[in-house]
């Protein structure tokens, strides 16, 4: 049954019906003031009854829950299109810092066959090996050239957010931004652990601004860009997730890549996209959310940190229009973040928080992972396996991993090392 808030109403009516706050209320940071809440059953099928076994979860409950997420949060899934390499894949043997040998691949992928199909530049580093390697795939915000100081990386052509410190002005990548974000993308250390690293700029798929839709992939997929959008119309997060799947289409054709062990990882807004990519595309063998917060791994019903009202006001282009209608009425959402997380089951999922990142609600991210446990249990696995929020810098979990790192909102070496530890154990049996 369609949810009353998403059935038959126009966006204008929905939004008009949804201004209980008189603007966005101040976010709550007081643990004692968190109102009690009840989460929807993560295993429920359309009749409200929980799946009794893994087969019923797969056949009935999971598709139902996925559809609720489409309708209320991220928008309808976008169809796959043929992906072609523009020109040729550029392959180079490079020596990185610390005398680390690597193969660097760069490719411009054309996404689809429409006249207005868009292209995305993908950068891949692989360790020297004669066997296919598992690869971490991450979208970036500032262009591939910002991910590493390697002067051979193509300068991004995407619209990127201005970052004066990184030499990005006028929304265009410049040589001054080379390596500006390298701290967040430790290629040498991950290669040393036997993993490939792949990245592409989210701006190639959907420029991250409220009016980015006409310059995104969406018109080439026949999606509307102007006027009243359908309430379940996909936004930037859905487009980024779709872009991750199209990159995967190409990655799995590379002989050096282990197609059964591609991990999708994302930080913050791109952590939300990584979760949705993993939900929509089960070819991703493992999913990593780093501090994805509201609209990602953090429970919406827990009124702590960023709220639906704030996020849909600041970033009206990220979610489907229906999501904004739940501002101030999160209890009416038929899903919550635990359902988003459960979409990864029975595959391995890692959720990472940072203790000073109150905006993303670290505890709410942990509690969502706890509440997602039944999905793994039904599939015969242990998910997180604990309901006790661990101390800082103390990873926990089995098929679902979790840590809360000391420090602020960021993606640092500590996080990557834990992702690699978890992938070693869950994907490589080490
Ligand atoms: C914030 C936003 C968060 C998170 C963050 C980021 O402004 O409110 O939900 O996405 O940006 O992406 O760094």
Image (cartoon, helix red, strand yellow):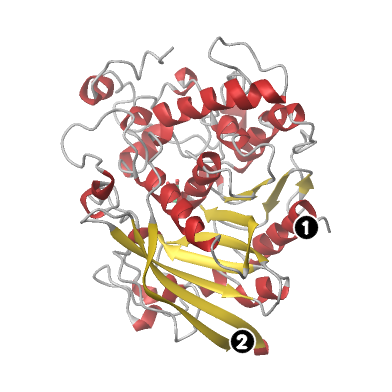
Q: Give whichever of discs 2 and 1 has the lower sequence position.
A: 2
Quadrant in which the N terminus is drawn: top left
Quadrant in which the C terminus is drawn: bottom right
378 horizontally vs 214: left or right: right
Res 207 visible? yes
Question: Where residue 216 sits in the image (x, y, percent)?
Answer: 28, 53
In the image, is residue 209 above or below residue 99? above
* Residue 15 vs residue 109, the one in the foreground: 109
Question: Cβ–Cβ below 8 Å for labels 2 and 1?
Answer: no
Q: Residue 258, located in which quarter of the rendered image?
A: bottom right
In the image, is residue 226 above or below residue 406? above
**SS for callout 1:** helix
As drawn, the label of residue 97 is 2
Distance from Cα at disc 2 to Cα at disc 1: 27 Å
Question: Where residue 259 sits in the image (x, y, percent)?
Answer: 62, 58
* Residue 116 vs residue 166, the one in the foreground: 116
Question: Where residue 138 sits in the image (x, y, percent)?
Answer: 52, 60
The residue located at (79%, 55%) in the rendering is 425
Beta carbon of the mark 2 residue lies under 8 A of ligand 1: no
Q: Looking at the image, is mark 2 or mark 1 nearer the viewer?
A: 1
Res 354 visible? no
As drawn, the label of residue 206 is none
* Residue 273 vs residue 381, the one in the foreground: 381
Question: Where residue 376 sits in the image (x, y, percent)?
Answer: 72, 33
86 horizontally vs 180: left or right: left
As drawn, the label of residue 428 is 1
Dot 2: few (<14), some (14–19), or many (≥20) neighbours within 10 Å? few
The residue located at (45%, 75%) in the rendering is 106
């Amino acid at each position: 049954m369609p949810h009353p808030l998403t059935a038959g109403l126009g966006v204008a009516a929905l939004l008009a019906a949804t201004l209980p706050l008189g603007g966005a209320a101040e976010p709550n940071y007081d643990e004692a003031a968190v109102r009690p809440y009840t989460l929807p059953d993560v295993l429920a099928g359309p009749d409200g009854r929980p799946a009794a076994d893994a087969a019923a979860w797969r056949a009935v409950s999971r598709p139902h829950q996925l559809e609720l997420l489409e309708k209320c949060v991220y928008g309808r899934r976008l169809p796959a299109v043929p992906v072609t390499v523009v020109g040729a894949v550029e392959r180079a043997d490079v020596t990185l810092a610390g005398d680390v040998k690597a193969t660097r691949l760069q490719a411009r992928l054309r996404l689809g066959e429409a006249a207005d199909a868009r292209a995305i530049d993908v950068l891949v580093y692989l360790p020297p090996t004669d066997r296919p390697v598992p690869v971490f795939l991450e979208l970036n915000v500032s262009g591939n050239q910002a991910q590493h100081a390697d002067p051979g990386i193509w300068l991004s052509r995407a619209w990127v957010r201005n970052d004066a410190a990184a030499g990005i002005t006028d929304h265009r990548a410049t040589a001054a931004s080379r390596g500006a974000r390298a701290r967040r993308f430790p290629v040498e250390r991950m290669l040393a652990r036997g993993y490939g690293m792949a990245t592409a700029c989210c701006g190639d798929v959907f420029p991250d601004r409220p009016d980015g839709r006409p310059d995104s992939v969406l018109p080439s997929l026949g999606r509307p860009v102007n006027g009243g959008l359908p309430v379940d119309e996909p936004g930037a997060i859905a487009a980024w997730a779709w872009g991750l799947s199209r990159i995967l289409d190409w990655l799995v054709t590379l002989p050096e890549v282990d197609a059964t062990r591609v991990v999708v990882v994302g930080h913050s807004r791109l952590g939300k996209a990584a979760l949705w990519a993993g939900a929509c595309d089960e070819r991703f063998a493992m999913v990593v959310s780093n501090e994805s917060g509201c609209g990602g791994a953090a429970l919406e019903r827990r009124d702590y940190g960023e709220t639906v009202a704030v996020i849909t006001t600041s970033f009206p282009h990220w979610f489907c229009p229906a999501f904004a209608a739940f501002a101030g009425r999160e209890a009416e959402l038929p899903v919550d973040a635990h359902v988003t997380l459960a979409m990864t089951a029975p595959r391995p999922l890692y959720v990472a928080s940072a203790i000073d990142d109150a905006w993303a609600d670290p505890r709410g991210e942990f509690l969502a992972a706890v509440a997602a446990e039944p999905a793994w249990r039904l599939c015969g696995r242990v998910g997180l396996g604990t309901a006790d929020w661990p101390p800082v810098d103390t990873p926990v979990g089995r098929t679902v991993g979790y840590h809360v790192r000391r420090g602020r909102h960021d993606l640092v070496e500590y996080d990557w090392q834990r992702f690699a530890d978890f992938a070693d154990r869950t994907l490589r049996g080490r």
